[in-house]
Image (cartoon, grey):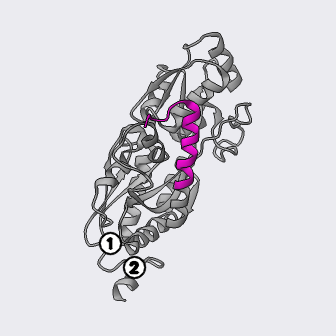
Amino acid sequence: MALASALPSGIVRAQGFPSRPITLIAPSVVGGSTDVVCRAMAESVGRRLGVAVVVENKAGAGGSLGGLALASARPDGYTVALLPLATFRMPLMQKMAFDPLRDIAYVAGLGGFVFGLAVKADGPFRSLAELIAHARQHPGEVSYGHAGIGSTPHLAVEELAQKTGVQFTAVPYKGSNEALAALLGGQISVMSGTTEFAPHVQSGKLRVLATLGAQRAAAFPDVPTLRESGVDIVNESPFGIGAPRGTDASVVRTLHDAFRASLDDPMVKSVYARFMLPMIPMNPAEYEAFARRTVATERTTLARLGLLKKE
């Protein structure tokens, strides 16, 4: 009881947990929005649980390496990972040594990434229609950068090309920050990515042609969605925290409570605001149900695009 009463309001530990540092895997390069969000939450959660939460970056495979790491980690709560949508998609596209519905215990849904198509403000494209028209007249000339093969920004543009009958040239990068630098430097025509580009939109260097959600992004209320622009594509990307399957339910609840409480931390709130990320809290049962729905939805989308792996 003394231990519980010493913790912040609403946080109750599983007996004996945690007693040593926790590793939080950020499936991204250092400095991107995923990494920055992970580091803010790690600091907040560490304060609440009284142990260090150490961020370990594992970039690549479209953002799915956190899920892969959980499949081989001990189910003791000392290894957790941020799970982007690629966690559910990549094992459907290629052979990977994990199954998101078999190997992951879902701890907490936390937020969502906002995706959009950004171009240079002083460039030739002022609308998605202008971009599509130019790509139709000049096949392959319009290049777009994205944060990795199989990532949501990559597949969204591939589906856009398929539905509009145009040809783009895809340029994969290790993360959204690299794609952003390439756009600002004029190496690519378009960036398909998350809101790392938001400060440059606000400063007038970049323009957002469309966002990818079902509703207009609060960050860009004047920017139409792809659907509003006449292309029936919706890509939304809630993210959260997972642990290895088999982790004790009391440990999962301790982790859930700490990560959920981090959403009320002013420091974490400021990072979400910086990247214009919505907060989407889900408890373990809600997050696992979301995971199961998402795997089914991704399977349908990948089949439509001809990208399902051969069994």
Q: Quadrant of residue 43?
A: bottom left
Q: Observer-nearest residue: 221 or 21?
A: 21
State the separation of the CA atoms marked 2 and 1: 8 Å
Residue 234 screen position, x and y as percent: 64, 40
> Of helix, strand and loop, which one carries label 2?
loop
Image quadrant for the N terminus?
bottom left
Which numbered disc, 2 or 1, marks the residue that appears first in the sequence? Answer: 2
Residue range of the region highlighted in magenta in the rendering: 292-311
> Of helix, strand and loop, which one carries label 1?
loop
The residue positioned farthest toward the left in the image shown: 20
The amino acid beneath tag 1 is Gly
Residue 183 screen position, x and y as percent: 50, 25
| Residue position marked by numbered label 1 in the rendering | 50
The amino acid beneath tag 2 is Leu
Q: Observer-nearest residue: 88 or 170?
A: 88
| Residue position marked by numbered label 2 in the rendering | 7
Residue 8 screen position, x and y as percent: 43, 77
- Dot 2 and dot 1 residues touching (CB under 8 Å): yes
Indicate which disc residue 134 carries: none
Q: Left of 162 or right of it: where is 52?
A: left
Residue 255 magenta: no
